[in-house]
Amino acid sequence: MIAVFAFSLIALSTLVVALSAALLAGHLPQPEPDEGTAAHIFQLSIALLMPAILVFLATANWARPGRVLRALVLPACAVAFAFGLLYYFEHVAPSA
């Protein structure tokens, strides 16, 4: 379960750091030819999140499914927010 939290929060934090830098600078940075380290960390955390969720679901106590689903709410919200920020940066935000 800790891995699920960790990977989802790492994915979110890479985008929050980029958003914070953009807000402090007053504009979004120019796209780089290479995606950069933050993009690779985001991609790796999302890739590692899937097996972590599968392991969690395989080893969960399904006698209490409500508790299992409640444990997945925060990671699901973090990943949804991370992908929302990613969509915003790529499609909605004006380029500098």
Image (cartoon, helix red, strand yellow):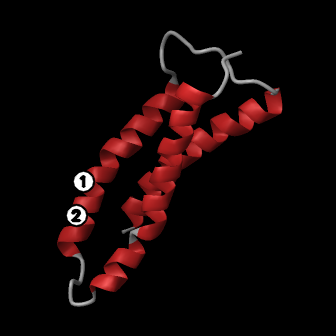
Rendered image quadrant of residue 66? bottom left
Q: Which of 68 and 87 is in front in this view?
A: 87
Compared to residue 17, the image places residue 34 above or below, namely: above
Residue highlighted by disc 2: 55
| Local crowd size for mark 1, using a 10 Å CA cut-off: few (<14), some (14–19), many (≥20) | few
Which secondary structure lies at badge 2?
Answer: helix
Rendered image quadrant of residue 3? bottom left
Residue under the point 35% across and 75% down: 69
Quadrant where the C terminus sits is top right
Residue under the point 72% across and 39% down: 20
Residue highlighted by disc 1: 51
Q: In this view, does 43 lie to the left or right of 65?
A: right
| Local crowd size for mark 2, using a 10 Å CA cut-off: few (<14), some (14–19), many (≥20) | some
Residue sitting farthest toward the front: 92
Q: What type is the residue that disc 1 sits on?
A: Pro
Residue under the point 45% across and 38% down: 42
Q: Nearer the viewer, residue 87 or 20?
A: 87
Q: Is residue 45 left or right of residue 18?
A: left
Compared to residue 87, the image places residue 61 above or below, namely: below
CB within 8 Å, label 2 to label 1: yes
Q: What type is the residue that disc 2 sits on?
A: Val
Which secondary structure lies at badge 1?
Answer: helix
Percent of width and height locating residue 40: 44, 30
Percent of width and height locating residue 88: 57, 34
Quadrant where the N terminus sits is bottom left
